[in-house]
């Protein structure tokens, strides 16, 4: 029921993803009448879907704490998360209220043992392929221990998504020199260099290196990560507007644009944020995907695809195994 257009986009997106993954089954939570009106458009999707009626949905502008206390457990959002907690679903995907989704997910699913805070990870297009960036909005600020945790979780996601045995991890910083940056970032860097972890620590990277694909995983705290994400999305739209204006500036430019249509289509595909829509909440006992509220059916299908891939590749168990390694190391350090 969340997002700018509710069931219309969610169900159309589910239909697109079903074509790519025909074995998927869906449980739709929300206003049954509104959901079934949309499902009538997609007979095959209707066959693969169960509808659970709920009278309550969380408004997009609701404060997370109030949403959780007053109506949380009767809402479509809570019941969808609860389905993952009970093992009835492999992942929950929502375009709803981000804060409420995070608060309810933490309360219902709980964090993994040894993880202090969950993080939101996003897939980022690069010159070579894609990388993972986290945190992009779950936390404002992070200490050294949390940055190390983010690194471990991001590396586990990279293994699940990209099939890389030891993903490279970089800490986003104001410079690549070891003397630069806040104390907590320096402490995290020292820990990543010293600990035996299932990742390759690259070192500090600056913002301009993210899009070049220098590392597989970029780690930062949520405030700067969210700003970087929104800046990148805005820049992509800005460049698109520049190109469109340039191609319409003269007759020769329009003729050239006709011959370059194939190249422009490839560029549009690469820069289209809908193709990589979906932030995953890492560090929970379950898979939770947050879709952009303003996306269309193509973007929502991408978010569902991400949830499908993470469930199929055992993301939660991968993170559990890696966190156990670091917990054992920390226990030894405390004992000594």
Image: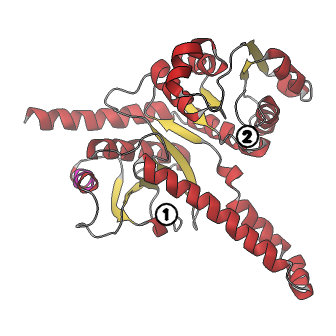
Q: Residue at horizontal 28%, vertical 54%?
A: 185
Q: Secondary structure at mark 1?
A: loop
Q: Which residues are magenta?
A: 187-192
Sequence-wise first label, 1 or 2: 1
Q: Is residue 35 above or below residue 140?
A: above
Q: Where is residue 109 drawn, in percent x and y? A: 48, 21
Quarter of the figure with the N terminus:
top right
In this rendering, position of residue 112 left or right of residue 330: right
What numbered label is drawn on residue 210? 1
202 or 280, nearer to the observer? 280
Quarter of the figure with the C terminus:
top left
1 and 2 marks in contact (CB < 8 Å): no
Q: Where is residue 197 drawn, in percent x and y? A: 30, 46
Circle 1 Cα neighbour tier, 10 Å, few/some/many (<14 / 14–19 / ≥20) = many
In this rendering, position of residue 116 left or right of residue 135: left
Q: Residue at horizontal 82%, vertical 22%?
A: 35
230 or 170, nearer to the observer? 230
Res. 264 image quadrant: bottom right
Q: Residue at horizontal 81%, vertical 34%?
A: 15
The residues tagged by marks 1 and 2 sit, at their Cα atoms, a distance apart of 25 Å
Res. 156 image quadrant: top left
Q: Residue at horizontal 71%, vertical 57%?
A: 272
What numbered label is drawn on residue 301? 2
- Res 154 visible: yes
Q: Where is residue 24 drawn, in percent x and y? A: 72, 28
In this rendering, position of residue 186 left or right of residue 206: left
């Amino acid at each position: 029921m969340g997002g700018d257009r509710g069931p219309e986009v969610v169900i159309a997106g589910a239909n697109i993803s079903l074509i790519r993954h025909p074995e998927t089954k869906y449980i739709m939570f929300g206003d049954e009448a509104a959901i079934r009106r949309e499902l009538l458009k997609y007979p095959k999707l209707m066959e693969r879907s169960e509808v659970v009626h709920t009278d309550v949905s969380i408004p997009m502008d609701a404060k997370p704490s109030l949403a959780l206390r007053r109506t949380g457990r009767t809402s479509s959002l809570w019941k969808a998360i609860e389905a993952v907690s009970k093992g009835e679903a492999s992942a929950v995907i929502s375009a709803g209220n981000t804060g409420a989704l995070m608060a309810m997910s933490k309360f219902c699913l709980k964090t993994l043992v040894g993880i202090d805070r969950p993080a939101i990870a996003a897939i980022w297009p690069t010159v070579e392929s894609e990388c993972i960036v986290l945190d992009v909005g779950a936390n404002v600020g992070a200490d050294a221990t949390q940055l190390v945790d983010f690194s471990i979780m991001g590396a586990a996601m990279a293994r699940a998504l990209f099939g890389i045995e030891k993903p490279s991890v970089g800490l986003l910083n104001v410079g690549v020199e070891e003397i630069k940056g806040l104390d907590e970032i320096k402490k995290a860097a020292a820990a990543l260099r010293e600990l035996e972890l299932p990742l390759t620590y690259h070192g500090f990277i600056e913002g301009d290196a993210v899009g070049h694909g220098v590392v597989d995983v970029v780690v930062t705290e949520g405030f700067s990560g969210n700003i970087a994400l929104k800046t990148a999305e805005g820049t992509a739209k800005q460049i698109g507007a520049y190109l469109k204006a340039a191609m319409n500036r003269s007759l020769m430019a329009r003729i050239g644009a006709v011959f370059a249509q194939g190249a422009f289509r490839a560029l549009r595909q690469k820069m289209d944020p809908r193709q990589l829509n979906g932030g995953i909440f890492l560090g929970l006992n379950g898979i939770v995907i947050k879709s952009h509220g303003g996306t269309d059916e193509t973007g929502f299908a991408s978010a569902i695809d991400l949830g499908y891939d993470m469930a199929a590749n055992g993301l939660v168990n991968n993170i559990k195994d890696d966190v156990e390694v670091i917990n054992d190391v920390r226990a030894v350090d405390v004992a000594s």
